[in-house]
Image (cartoon, rainbow, N blue to C red):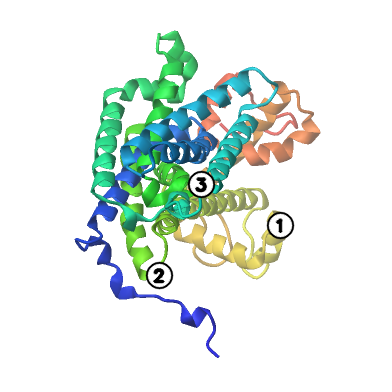
Amino acid sequence: MPTLLAQLNINPGDWLLPWDSFYLKGTLCSILVGLTCGVLGAFVVLRRMALIGDALSHAVLPGVVLTFMLTGDTQPLPLLAGAMGAGLLAAVLINLVTRHSRTKEDSSIGVVFTAMFAVGILLTNSLPQGTHFDLKCFLFGDALQVGTADLTLMTIISAAVLGLVVLLYHRLKLVSFDPLVAAAMGVSVGVTHYLLMGMLSATVVAGLKSTGVVLVVAMVITPASAAYQLTNRFAVMLWLSGLFGAISAALGMSVAFIFNASTGPAMVIVATGIFGLAMLLSPTHGVIFERLRRGKLARHVRNEDLLKALYRLGPLPEPTHRATLADHLKIQPARLARTVARLRREGLVTPHGSVALTDAGTAHAQKMVRAHRLWETYLTDRAGVAPDRVHDQAERLEHAHDLNDRLDEMLGRPDTDPHGSEIPR
C-alpha cells in the first residue's frame, strides 16, 4: 500500500503558473506585501519590536470581523479601516498597561494581543450559520482570493508607506537608533511610534489575503533579519529587506503551486530559507565565515606558539622534535606536523634536517617573547595580578603583538619582566 508521502501532490512544472494572467493579481499583491513588510521590518527589527509586530498582526482580527458584522461584506477598504482601528487600539492598550502596571512591555504585549485575538475568534464563532466569512483565508492567507480591489488597495498603501519612509527617513532612523537623542532634538517619539504602528497595521491588513494574520509577522521580521546579517549600513539594510520580502513572496507563490499548498506558509518558508542562507554565508556575521576566521586565528596562534617554543628550546633533531614539541605545546602530533610544514613554507623554520628557526623565524619569535614579557609586566604593575599568576593570562594576550610598542611606552620601557627575565628590545 503506498504511503502518504508517496501520494503527495507535487507538480514541479507549475512553478511559472503564478505569472499566468489568471493568478497575476495575487502574485503582484503578494510581492507588494513582501516589499512593504520588508522595509517596515527593518525599523521593527532595529527597535526590537518583533513582539509588537506579532501583536498587531493578531490584534487586527476583531477589527476585521466587527467591520464585516457591521457592513455585511468583505470589501477591502472598510476592512482596512476597521483593522487599522483595532491595530492602533492594541498599540495604545499595550502602552497603557506598561505605564500603569508592574507588567513589563513584553508581558503587556502578550496580554493585549492574545486577548484581542481571542475576541476576534469569539466574534467569528458568533456569526450566524451560513454567513460567508472565510476565517482560514484571513488567518493563513490565500493569494488566489485577491481581486482587483485588493490589488489596487495594496498598491496605494505600498506607495504611501514607501513614500512616508523616504520622506521621514532621517526621523524614523533617529528614533529607531536612539529615541532619547531624538526626543532631545525635538522629534516627537510618540507620534513617530504610532505612525510606524499605523503603517504596519495598514500593510498587515492589506496583505491579509496573501499571508494571513498568523504568518504576516514573519514577512515583517524574517527578511529584515536576513538583511541585518549582511550589512551594518541602515540604508543598505532597508533595500535588502524590501528585496528579500519581494523575492520571498514571488518564490513563495511558485512553491505554493508546486506543492499545491497555501500561499502564506510557502512565502514564510522561502523567507526563512533566505534568512538561513544569510546566517550561514554572511561575510561578516555568518556562521561559516566565523568558523573560518576562528580556524585562521587558531592556526596563527599555533604558529606563534611553535616559534616561541623553538626560540626557547633551540634546534631539535628531526626524529625527536615531534614528541618534544607536542608535549611542550600540548597539541596532537598530526596537527603539530601540519604547523611545522606551514612554517617551513613561510620560511620561518629550516626546510630540512633539524627543526630550527631561520633568521626571519627568530625575529618573529623575539617579538612574541617581548610581547609576553611586556604583558606580564603590565598585568603585575597596572592590573595588580600576582607575578606567579600572570603567565597564563599573558599567553592569551601576547598574540596582540601589534600593541607591543604602545605597551612598552606606557610601561616606561622596562628592561625586565616581573620574573627578572630580560625584555627583548
Disc 2 from disc 3: Cα separation: 33 Å
Disc 3 from disc 1: Cα separation: 74 Å
Which label is found at residue 127? 3
**Earlier-in-chain disc, 3 versus 1:** 3
Residue 170, percent across and down? 33, 22
Q: Amino acid type of disc 2?
A: Phe
Vertical arrangement, residue 387 with respect to residue 204, above or below: above
The mark lying in front, picked from 2 and 3, is: 3
Rate crowding at label 2 as few (under 14), some (14 to 19) or many (20 or more) other CA atoms within 10 Å.
some
Q: Amino acid type of disc 1?
A: Lys
Residue 126 in the figure: left or right of residue 136 = right
Q: Amino acid type of disc 3?
A: Leu
Which label is found at residue 55? none
The mark lying in front, picked from 3 and 1, is: 3
Residue 220, percent across and down? 42, 42
Residue 195, percent across and down? 39, 24
Q: Which residue is mark 2?
A: 259
The quarter of the image holding the N terminus is bottom right
